[in-house]
Image (spheres, rainbow, N blue to C red):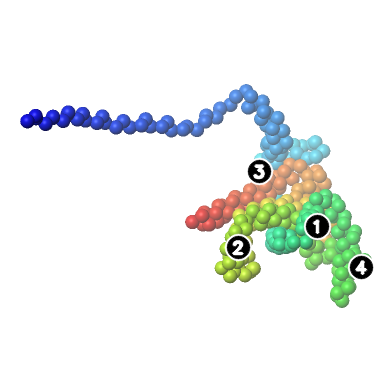
């Protein structure tokens, strides 16, 4: 008998080698180079010459008694700011500005949304509707002001009075000369003129909503109003926040149409704060005092912007949850 062959000893398997760790990508280093400085230098020069320097120069002017004739100019500290706070004309002009903002913001936002919904769902000559609703926004302020001053609002023969007479109402309303109607007339003019910008923003947001959401809701039996309330309006929440912020800031800076149509009258009932700054600086020749009033108004706009920014950020955080 032959002995069975003994099996060869097995060698232990070599330990598995771990793959080398991948290097963690690092953020690219950003540093100034002469080439980058050359590219941004034109912008920095224009930005400094037309924004930073006037900002600093105006702040320094607000601390002096400088006037437009070149006389005076001595340092007065915060006296201009104290006088502006005590000036009743500043507060009345500021109230007119805030009241105009309140009256104009809501119809501008709502009307822009309604026009965008109509233009988005119309299937006949869409380009004509979009052009007709956006075209007034392209007109200069002087054209709009003179159009409403000489065509729409003149008493007895203006288009507004003729429309009232056609409806059987009493014409002859002092649209721009009566304190009860002057501010409302300016608001209607501004809504007709500037609603096209909000309309364009809402229309772009509507076209970005995925169509399959409406198809799924329609399959579930949702009607048009349910789709509007449950899909369209929630998807437009961010756009609405942007529109409200832009509209409030634009309304606070109202000047052109008021200056052309009413001149701040009647009896300063429509004079905004920017017109008072203009009158104090170029009619009263007190550029130092006008600068102080304008910087107080700038502080108000800054506070409003920060409050709206905090509110919009909180809304986005609640929506993300």
Residue 222 position in % (x across, y down):
59, 69
Q: Nearer the viewer, mark 3 or mark 2?
A: 2
Decide: marks 2, 1 in contact (CB < 8 A)?
no
Q: Residue at x 80, y 50 (%)?
A: 138
**Between disc 4 and disc 2, whose residue precedes?**
4
Q: Nearer the viewer, mark 4 or mark 2?
A: 2
Inspect this view and state whether residue 290 appears: yes
**Between disc 1 and disc 3, whose residue precedes?**
3
- Which secondary structure lies at badge 1? helix
Inspect this view and state whether residue 258 appears: no
Residue 94 position in % (x across, y down):
71, 55
Q: Nearer the viewer, mark 1 or mark 3?
A: 1
Tell me, for residue 128, which label it has, or none.
Answer: 1
**Between disc 3 and disc 2, whose residue precedes?**
3
**Between disc 3 and disc 4, whose residue precedes?**
3
Q: Residue tagged by mark 2?
A: 215
Q: Is residue 168 above or below residue 10?
A: below
Give the Cα separation between the discs numbered 1 and 3. 55 Å
**Between disc 1 and disc 4, whose residue precedes?**
1
Quadrant in which residue 42 is drawn: top right
**Residue neighbourhood size for the residue with mark 1, other residues' Cα within 10 Å, grouped as few (<14), some (14–19), many (≥20):** few
């Amino acid at each position: 008998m032959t002995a069975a062959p003994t099996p060869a000893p097995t060698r232990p398997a070599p330990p598995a080698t771990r793959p080398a760790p991948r290097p963690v990508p690092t953020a690219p280093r950003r540093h100034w180079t002469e080439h980058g400085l050359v590219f941004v230098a034109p912008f920095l020069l224009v930005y400094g010459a037309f924004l930073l320097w006037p900002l600093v120069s105006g702040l320094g002017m607000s601390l002096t008694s400088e006037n437009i004739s070149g006389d005076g100019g001595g340092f007065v500290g915060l006296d201009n700011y104290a006088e502006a706070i005590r000036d009743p004309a500043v507060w009345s002009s500021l109230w007119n500005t805030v009241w105009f903002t309140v009256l104009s913001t809501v119809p501008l936002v709502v009307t822009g949304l309604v026009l965008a919904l109509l233009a988005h769902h119309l299937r006949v000559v869409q380009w004509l509707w979009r052009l007709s609703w956006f075209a007034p926004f392209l007109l200069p302020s002087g054209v709009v002001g003179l159009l409403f001053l000489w065509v729409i609002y003149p008493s007895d023969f203006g288009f507004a009075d003729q429309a009232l007479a056609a409806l059987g109402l009493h014409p002859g309303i002092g649209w721009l000369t009566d304190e009860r109607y002057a501010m409302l007339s300016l608001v209607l003019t501004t809504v007709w003129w500037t609603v096209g910008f909000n309309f364009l923003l809402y229309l772009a947001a509507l076209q970005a909503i995925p169509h399959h959401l409406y198809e799924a809701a329609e399959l579930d039996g949702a009607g048009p109003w349910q789709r509007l309330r449950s899909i369209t309006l929630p998807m437009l929440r961010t756009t609405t926040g942007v529109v409200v912020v832009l509209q409030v800031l634009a309304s606070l800076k109202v000047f052109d149409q008021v200056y052309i149509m009413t001149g701040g009258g009647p009896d300063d009932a429509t004079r905004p704060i920017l017109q008072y700054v203009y009158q104090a600086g170029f009619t009263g020749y007190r550029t130092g005092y006008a600068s102080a009033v304008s910087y107080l108004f700038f502080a108000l706009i800054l506070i409003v912007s920060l409050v709206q920014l905090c509110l919009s950020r909180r809304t986005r955080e609640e929506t993300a949850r």
